[in-house]
Amino acid sequence: MINQDRICCEAMGRQLNYVCDQHPDLIDCPDVVIRYFPHVDKFGFPIRDGGASSLDAHYCPWCGAKLPEPKRNQWFDTLENLGYGTPLTDEIPVEYRTDRWWRELGL
């Protein structure tokens, strides 16, 4: 479940907390139109090409609220400074797979 401070409106909340009884992994669910990636504080529209790619969302498609700037660059920089050369495939500390790292840094 997504932290409430990232939900800008009721429609966004319904979408981000959606549970599909046919697709345990929501990346496979065609009913999901937006996803949230807490480790980099990013919202994205899924690209249906069989992978996990998404297009960055900068505004809520329902209420128009500005969404937070993704912390992707800070995530890579932080992990590189810790000695992880390829964080997408390296075993990285669990807090870097969640929003814990950037919340603790006050980002």
Image (cartoon, rainbow, N blue to C red):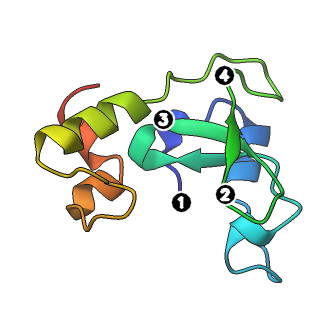
Question: Disc 3 designates what residue?
Answer: 5
- Horizontal side of 23 relative to 94 (left or right) equals right
Q: State the separation of the CA atoms marked 3 and 2.
A: 13 Å
Q: Kindly identify the amino acid type of the residue bearing the numbered disc 4.
A: His
Residue 6 pos. (x, y %):
53, 36
Q: Tell me whether the residue at label 1 lies in contact with that at label 2, contact meaning CB atoms closer than 8 angstroms.
A: yes
Question: Disc 2 designates what residue?
Answer: 17
Q: Kindly identify the amino acid type of the residue bearing the numbered disc 3.
A: Asp
- Horizontal side of 48 relative to 74 (left or right) equals right
Query: Can you say which quadrant of the picture contains the C terminus?
Result: top left
Question: Disc 1 designates what residue?
Answer: 1
Q: Nearer the viewer, residue 2 or 38?
A: 38
Q: State the separation of the CA atoms marked 3 and 4.
A: 16 Å
Residue occupying the far front of the picture: 85
Task: Name which of mark 4 and mark 2 comes first in the sequence.
Answer: 2
Q: Kindly identify the amino acid type of the residue bearing the numbered disc 1.
A: Met
Q: State the separation of the CA atoms marked 1 and 3.
A: 12 Å
Q: Nearer the viewer, residue 3 or 88?
A: 88
Q: Which secondary structure, mark 4?
A: loop
